[in-house]
Amino acid sequence: MLKPGIIIALFTFSNAVFADACMLESTQKNFPNKSCMQNSGTPAAIFNDFCGGAADEDHTVTKVDKCPPKSLATCTIKLNGVNGTFIQYIYTASLLPMYKMVCSANPAGEGVWKQN
Protein backbone atom coordinates (compact mmCIF):
# COMPACT_ATOMS: atom_id res chain seq x y z
CA MET A 1 0.00 0.00 0.00
CA LEU A 2 1.21 3.50 -0.79
CA LYS A 3 2.53 5.24 2.28
CA PRO A 4 0.94 8.68 2.93
CA GLY A 5 4.31 10.38 2.80
CA ILE A 6 5.31 8.99 -0.61
CA ILE A 7 4.77 12.29 -2.40
CA ILE A 8 6.62 14.22 0.28
CA ALA A 9 9.37 11.60 0.16
CA LEU A 10 9.82 12.16 -3.55
CA PHE A 11 10.41 15.83 -2.80
CA THR A 12 13.09 15.08 -0.22
CA PHE A 13 15.24 12.29 -1.70
CA SER A 14 18.52 13.40 -3.19
CA ASN A 15 20.44 11.37 -5.80
CA ALA A 16 22.00 12.48 -9.08
CA VAL A 17 19.34 12.15 -11.78
CA PHE A 18 19.37 14.67 -14.60
CA ALA A 19 16.11 15.13 -16.48
CA ASP A 20 13.41 17.64 -17.17
CA ALA A 21 10.85 15.25 -15.69
CA CYS A 22 10.66 12.05 -13.67
CA MET A 23 8.05 9.31 -13.60
CA LEU A 24 7.07 7.70 -10.28
CA GLU A 25 5.47 4.28 -10.76
CA SER A 26 4.38 1.49 -8.44
CA THR A 27 6.10 -1.85 -8.81
CA GLN A 28 3.11 -3.60 -7.17
CA LYS A 29 0.62 -4.90 -9.75
CA ASN A 30 -2.25 -5.01 -7.23
CA PHE A 31 -1.76 -1.36 -6.24
CA PRO A 32 -1.04 0.76 -9.31
CA ASN A 33 0.27 4.27 -8.88
CA LYS A 34 1.60 6.54 -11.57
CA SER A 35 2.58 10.19 -11.43
CA CYS A 36 5.17 12.38 -13.10
CA MET A 37 6.94 15.54 -11.96
CA GLN A 38 8.11 18.07 -14.52
CA ASN A 39 10.41 21.04 -14.08
CA SER A 40 9.02 24.41 -15.12
CA GLY A 41 11.79 26.94 -14.66
CA THR A 42 13.34 25.71 -11.41
CA PRO A 43 17.17 25.63 -11.47
CA ALA A 44 18.31 22.21 -12.73
CA ALA A 45 20.37 21.39 -9.63
CA ILE A 46 17.34 21.89 -7.37
CA PHE A 47 15.01 19.87 -9.61
CA ASN A 48 17.54 17.03 -9.86
CA ASP A 49 17.69 16.83 -6.06
CA PHE A 50 13.89 16.62 -5.84
CA CYS A 51 13.65 14.11 -8.68
CA GLY A 52 16.36 11.71 -7.57
CA GLY A 53 16.32 8.12 -6.45
CA ALA A 54 13.52 5.66 -5.73
CA ALA A 55 10.83 6.79 -3.31
CA ASP A 56 10.78 3.37 -1.61
CA GLU A 57 11.12 -0.33 -2.41
CA ASP A 58 7.61 -0.45 -3.93
CA HIS A 59 8.15 2.41 -6.43
CA THR A 60 10.59 3.36 -9.14
CA VAL A 61 11.63 6.80 -10.33
CA THR A 62 12.63 7.07 -13.99
CA LYS A 63 13.95 10.16 -15.74
CA VAL A 64 12.00 11.23 -18.82
CA ASP A 65 12.21 14.22 -21.14
CA LYS A 66 8.61 15.25 -20.59
CA CYS A 67 5.62 13.96 -18.63
CA PRO A 68 3.05 12.04 -20.71
CA PRO A 69 -0.10 13.98 -21.69
CA LYS A 70 -3.65 13.17 -20.58
CA SER A 71 -3.21 13.17 -16.82
CA LEU A 72 -6.26 13.11 -14.56
CA ALA A 73 -5.03 16.09 -12.54
CA THR A 74 -2.04 18.35 -11.99
CA CYS A 75 -0.48 20.03 -8.99
CA THR A 76 1.67 23.06 -9.78
CA ILE A 77 4.03 23.73 -6.89
CA LYS A 78 5.82 27.04 -6.40
CA LEU A 79 8.69 26.14 -4.09
CA ASN A 80 9.41 28.29 -1.07
CA GLY A 81 12.31 30.65 -1.79
CA VAL A 82 13.01 29.34 -5.32
CA ASN A 83 12.21 30.81 -8.74
CA GLY A 84 10.27 28.41 -10.95
CA THR A 85 7.79 25.62 -10.31
CA PHE A 86 7.32 21.87 -10.45
CA ILE A 87 4.25 20.41 -12.13
CA GLN A 88 3.12 17.02 -10.85
CA TYR A 89 0.90 15.04 -13.24
CA ILE A 90 -1.39 12.44 -11.65
CA TYR A 91 -2.50 9.36 -13.62
CA THR A 92 -4.10 7.15 -10.91
CA ALA A 93 -7.78 7.90 -10.20
CA SER A 94 -7.94 6.16 -6.81
CA LEU A 95 -5.22 8.42 -5.44
CA LEU A 96 -6.67 11.78 -6.53
CA PRO A 97 -8.00 12.72 -3.05
CA MET A 98 -4.62 12.06 -1.41
CA TYR A 99 -2.68 13.93 -4.09
CA LYS A 100 -5.10 16.86 -3.83
CA MET A 101 -4.61 17.03 -0.05
CA VAL A 102 -0.81 16.90 -0.35
CA CYS A 103 -0.84 19.52 -3.11
CA SER A 104 -2.79 22.02 -1.05
CA ALA A 105 -0.83 21.42 2.17
CA ASN A 106 2.68 20.82 0.81
CA PRO A 107 5.47 21.95 3.16
CA ALA A 108 7.84 22.46 0.19
CA GLY A 109 5.77 25.30 -1.24
CA GLU A 110 2.43 26.56 -2.44
CA GLY A 111 0.48 24.07 -4.57
CA VAL A 112 -2.33 24.77 -7.04
CA TRP A 113 -4.57 21.76 -7.83
CA LYS A 114 -6.34 21.33 -11.17
CA GLN A 115 -8.45 18.30 -11.99
CA ASN A 116 -8.67 17.69 -15.74
Image (tube, rainbow, N blue to C red):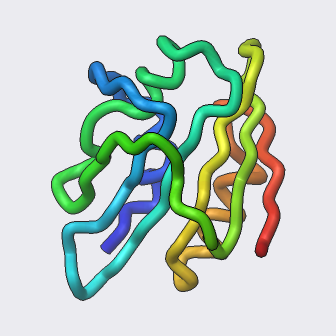
Residue name at image x 54 percent, y 75 percent: 95
Q: How many marks?
A: 0
Q: Residue 79's quadrant in the figure?
A: top right
Residue name at image x 60 percent, y 13 percent: 43
Query: Residue 7's x, y, as percent?
Result: 49, 50
> Looking at the image, is 110 positioned above or below residue 112?
above
Residue name at image x 73 percent, y 39 percent: 77
Residue name at image x 52 percent, y 16 percent: 44
> Looking at the image, is 86 positioned above or below residue 79?
below
Query: Residue 107's x, y, as percent?
Result: 66, 35
Is residue 81 or residue 47 the one in the foreground? 47
Is residue 18 or residue 92 the one in the foreground? 18
Is residue 52 or residue 65 the one in the foreground? 65
Q: Is residue 7 left or right of residue 14?
A: right
Q: Is residue 115 left or right of residue 92?
A: right
Q: Is residue 106 left or right of residue 51?
A: right
Q: Quadrant of the N terminus?
A: bottom left
Q: Quadrant of the C terminus?
A: bottom right
Q: Residue 84's quadrant in the figure?
A: top right
Query: Residue 99's x, y, as percent?
Result: 62, 63
